[in-house]
Image (cartoon, rainbow, N blue to C red):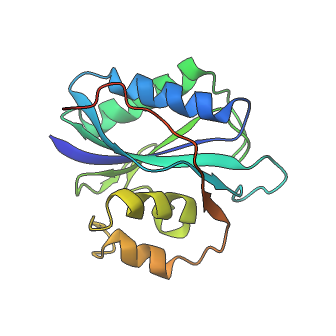
Amino acid sequence: MNRIFVSLGSNVGDRLAYLQAAVDAIETLPRTRVSALSAVYITEPVGKSDQPDFLNLVAELSSDLGARELFSAFKEIEKRIGRTASERWGPREIDLDLLYYGDAVIEELDLRIPHPERANRRFVLIPLVEIAPEVVDPVYHTVVQELLRRCPSSSAVQKTTLTIHRQHVES
């Protein structure tokens, strides 16, 4: 099983419901398990500031699906939840970004792992460090906690008391 991290975000409509629907959908993927969820954070939009704040979190998955299979499944989940084609950095119902797929480095036209902007996004790094500070970035060869320390962004990221529930929790 591969150790995978995905960032989830929403800034349109019932943001929390969209995030919950995405986690629920990920849990139904074959040979895939949600092993951890960060807290939910409220974050300023990046790249285009004239839009509502986002709710963001990071999920840790275990899966033996391939990176391409997961990427395609995430795009299908986004579509099912109601994501419409939008401008770059624009508002969206749901956004699923594959951050890490084990220690793989993949450079394809439409799939880049690790996510190319991860080290510049506090809204990704803060929830990631919350659940997995020891993860080593396969490109920078340093732990993600150090990436957060070096992150050039100063965007506001605030932990909330909102909760996303896993449906299949191991006992």
Figure check: 160 above or below 117: above
What is the x, y in percent for residue 113?
36, 53
Q: Is residue 63 left or right of residue 77?
A: left
Residue situated in front as seen by the camera: 165 or 56:
165
Q: Residue at x 51, y 61 (%)?
A: 117
Q: Which quarter of the rendering shows the C terminus? A: top left
Figure check: 78 above or below 151: above
Q: Is residue 16 left or right of residue 96?
A: right
What is the x, y in percent for residue 28?
33, 20
What is the x, y in percent for residue 16?
61, 34
Q: Is residue 28 left or right of residue 18?
A: left
Q: Is residue 106 left or right of residue 164?
A: left
Looking at the image, the residue that sits furthest to the right is: 50
Q: Residue at x 77, y 55 (%)?
A: 48
What is the x, y in percent for residue 131?
35, 57
Figure check: 68 above or below 100: above
Number of marks: 0
Q: Residue at x 46, y 57 (%)?
A: 127
Q: Which quarter of the rendering shows the N terminus? A: top left
Looking at the image, the residue that sits furthest to the left is: 1
Residue 56 visible in the picture: yes
Residue situated in front as seen by the camera: 24 or 164:
164
Residue situated in front as seen by the camera: 53 or 153:
53
Residue situated in front as seen by the camera: 87 or 154:
154
Determine the image quadrant of residue 104. bottom left
Residue 116 visible in the picture: no
Q: Residue at x 74, y 30 (%)?
A: 13
